[in-house]
Image (cartoon, helix red, strand yellow):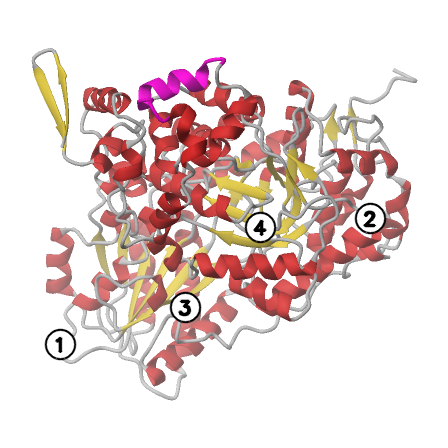
Amino acid sequence: MYRYSLGNRRWQFATLAELMAKATPARSGDRLAGVIAHTAEERVVAQMALAELPLKTFLTEALVPYEQDEVTRLILDDHDVGAFEPVSHLTVGDFRNWLLSDLATPEMLVRIRAGITPEMAAAVCKIMRNQDLILVAQKCRVQTAFRSTVGLPGRMSTRLQPNHPTDDITGIAASILDGLLYGSGDAVIGINPATDNVAQSVRLLQLMDEVIRKYEIPTQSCVLTHVTNTLEAIENRAPVDLVFQSIGGTEATNRSFGFDLATLAEARDAALSLNRGTVGNNVMYFETGQGSSLSADAHHGVDQQTCEARAYAVARKFEPLLVNTVVGFIGPEYLYDGKEITRAGLEDHFCGKLLGLPMGCDICYTNHAEADQNDMDNLLTLLGVAGCNFIMGIPGSDDIMLNYQTTSFHDALYVRRVLDKRPAPEFEQWLTRMQIFQDGEGKVPSDGLPEAFRKSLASLPGGVGS
Amino acid sequence: MTGQKPSVIANPWRRLSAWTDARIGLGRAGISLPTHEMLAFQLAHAQARDAVHLPLNTSALMKDLAELTERRKALLPHEPVHLQSQASDRITYLQRPDLGRRLSQKSCEALDRQGHTGDSPIDLALVVADGLSSYGVQENAVGFLEALLANLETDDQTWELAPLIVVSQGRVAIGDDVGHRLNARCVVVLIGERPGLSSPDSLGLYLTWAPEPGLTDASRNCISNIRPAGLSFKEASWRLGYLLREARRQEVSGVPLKDRSEETVIDQGIGNFLLR
């Protein structure tokens, strides 16, 4: 039982899960789950009670039972007491102060990473304002690499997402070309297949591999199919760079996705054995998003932001190249409007970075959410300031396969320009070498058609000149 | 103006849009979207938003369905029935998927009164729900049903049908509730799909064998993107006909019922031109 007195009024929260849920800024998913604070006042009281809680509590009180859940076991068994030492005496409220203070240097934040559990990150997140989430995340440096290096200071990368509703090869190739000529794709070229089976995945992997090799692009490819499909593709000797999987923060969520931790370990080993990286060996690409555990009825009464943070424990076990919170995709029953989507995007980015993950964000919305391009512009700018590792890039913001809107190739150039960000260094050099960009910093595209692509386009029926 | 660079840089690869609906080769003003493209996007988004919030014109739909029932008397001996989910308005519907999956008390009573098809089970209940695009339903439901009923009428086996059902503020799983109450062996829900920018009018359909409340998507087969610019009524009704016959023969639906009717996708385009 957690108690808090305010004046002569006494408040009670029966469990730690209830305290955490009620301290969470309002969102529709927690309302749907029935765990949300009943009043605005109760929420702030819960935040005050949570602020007084020692961080250590999370090491002895599991929100999801240890015996029932392998994610809880992973979190507690892998906890590094030595790394935790500098902050082990703090309450959640003091932890916020410490994170904001100059004691928390980028080096110090790296040092304590393995001592922070997802629940500690989620708890402090709940009592931080948006500017706090931005300021601290900006101090967290997470750098990963495969054929390009993602997450260096002053850089922001993009996933080129050339989806097509029928996986049409010409349509996909057209979107890839459009993206490359707008300087997109240094984090990954990643396709969500319309037809989700092994044969189709192999076909798409070969398509991307051939393009990457022909133009010697310092990037990696990924087909966002189920982990078991990718394993089979590797067995069939397909050119797999990255293994993809959607992950959640409880064992039951992941079982509903059709995998467990052992599956991910097996897939990572298989991808590592191919040894296809040149500047690094991070071979995993994970996607997450608040609401997935509730959607799978696997949330154990835990609020959606805490479930999301727990997914990051799964991710960090496998040293991913990219972790992408697909923040607005799930729909308004979990994140209702632009305000809730914005808050969730900043929370996820902060928690992931604090835990040491290469966080990117699919800054997105569906047409049944109360959100629009202006909301996305805001979140994009905020995440740019926060130092987000990568965002999506899609032609004109319109995903014609998944029927939602995410950031465009133009959006990435906007944020690079206003915040003085550059692409991954290997990719930036390639853009200059290929005469795709006229400056050396990946900010200004060339006016005409670069020489290397003229032949391909001239070969089209009717030709496409320069 | 001579000698001055234009403010908008066009992209010579724009012509590739002949092979895809993706918004490629949009050009740029500086590094931003040119005005024309920006407004074209805003229009598409506005249309998709309207599709979500536009209420289903139920009187027009019920009239069309009554006429359809009249034309197909042999298959449809009962008048169509209009029902309501427990989600009383659009805002509730969007935030409470659980309420959109259950019939209101009044509708339960109405269905028990009007929908009665006797004690022995009927073969099929067809349910039309507004879902996330009433536009998709308004534009495509009747045309699709025409094609499906023609298909069923000429089938080797007879199909005993429940009255056509329309549900306002309904989710896919409302079919389980409706089908169960109608004592239907199989239910097919036609529903307005989440509208995309390039497809605000998409109709989806979900087939469930032995419907009862509490089933999950693992028990359903789905056919998506039914609209003039997507999967045609004819092709969709042919595929559903295949699934219906197989569901009836094997007495299953969902994961164990594999859709082998889908033709292999043949690329319409010119392959990977980037390798030339």
Residue B114: where, in percent of width, then height? 14, 64
Contact flag, marks 3 and 1 (Cβ < 8 Å): no
Please state which of the two labelled residues, at mark 2 or mark 3, is closer to the viewer.
2
Asked if marks 3 and 1 fall on the same chain, the answer is yes
Left or right: where does residue A357 sit relative to residue A31?
A: right
Report which residue position mark 4 lands on: A284
Three-letter code for the amino acid on which mark 3 is drawn: Glu
Residue A250: where, in percent of width, then height? 35, 50
Most distant residue in the left direction: A8
Q: Which element carries disc 3, helix, strand or loop?
A: helix
Q: Which element carries disc 1, helix, strand or loop?
A: loop
Marks 3/1: CA–CA distance: 25 Å
Q: Which element carries disc 2, helix, strand or loop?
A: loop
Disc assigned to residue B155: none
Marks 3/4: CA–CA distance: 48 Å
Output the chain of dot 2.
A
Disc assigned to residue A216: 2
Three-letter code for the amino acid on which mark 2 is drawn: Glu
- The quarter of the rendered structure image containing the C terminus of chain A is top right
- Neighbour tally class for label 2: few under 14, some 14-19, many 20 plus, Cα within 10 Å: few
Disc assigned to residue B118: 1
Over which residues does the magenta segment extend? A88-102
Residue B188: where, in percent of width, then height? 33, 67
Quarter of the image holding residue A4? top left
Output the chain of dot 3.
B
Three-letter code for the amino acid on which mark 1 is drawn: Gly
Judge by depth and name the residue closer to the eye, B250 or A49. A49
Asked if marks 2 and 3 fall on the same chain, the answer is no
Residue at position x 40%, y 62% in the image: B205
Left or right: where does residue A19 sit relative to residue B252?
A: left
The answer to whether any part of residue A376 appears in the image is: no
Report which residue position mark 3 lands on: B146
